[in-house]
Image (cartoon, grey):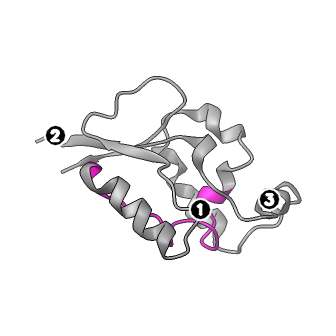
Amino acid sequence: SSGSVVASLVEPAKIPTLVGAKDAVASGIFSSIQPDNQRAARAIKKHSFMKDPKYPLLFDPQTAGGLLATVPQNRVSDCLRDLREAGYDSACVIGEITADGNHDGELVTLGAPIQ
């Protein structure tokens, strides 16, 4: 049977970066694991984002993923408030999860069939 598609819609402009991270990438400085991680790029549907300076950082294990979480929509405000009160001033929403993966605009679809 065919699976449904669940997608992460990410708004590139909202992705926070560490000071100097984009400069390091522009200088060709990457983690040794970053190229292996970038194989996941085949799941990205909006290829115009590939030209964004933040794009390679999505695959760098030193700067991506560790603090990425999904939160039920009705709990987002409370979660952000709690994180900011705990000192995580950069906590923010960078996208959303959708059931069909269809969206126009500046969001980047990262999706895969769910079996």
Q: CA distance from mark 1 to mark 2?
A: 39 Å
The image quarter in which residue 69 lies: bottom left
Q: Which quadrant is home to the N terminus?
A: top left
Label 3 sits on what residue type? Answer: Val
Of labels 1 and 3, earlier in sequence is 3
Q: CA distance from mark 2 to mark 3?
A: 39 Å
- Answer with left or right where residue 110 lies relative to residue 113: right
- Residue receiving disc 2: 2
The circle drawn on residue 25 is 3
The circle drawn on residue 79 is none
- Residue receiving disc 1: 90
Front of the two marks 1 and 3: 1
The image quarter in which residue 70 lies: bottom left
Q: Nearer the viewer, residue 37 or 79?
A: 79
Above or below — where is 48 with respect to 87? above
Which residue is farthest top? 104
Q: Nearer the viewer, residue 54 or 81?
A: 81
- Answer with left or right where residue 25 lies relative to residue 27: left
The residue shown at (63%, 56%) is 16
Above or below — where is 52 with respect to 77? above
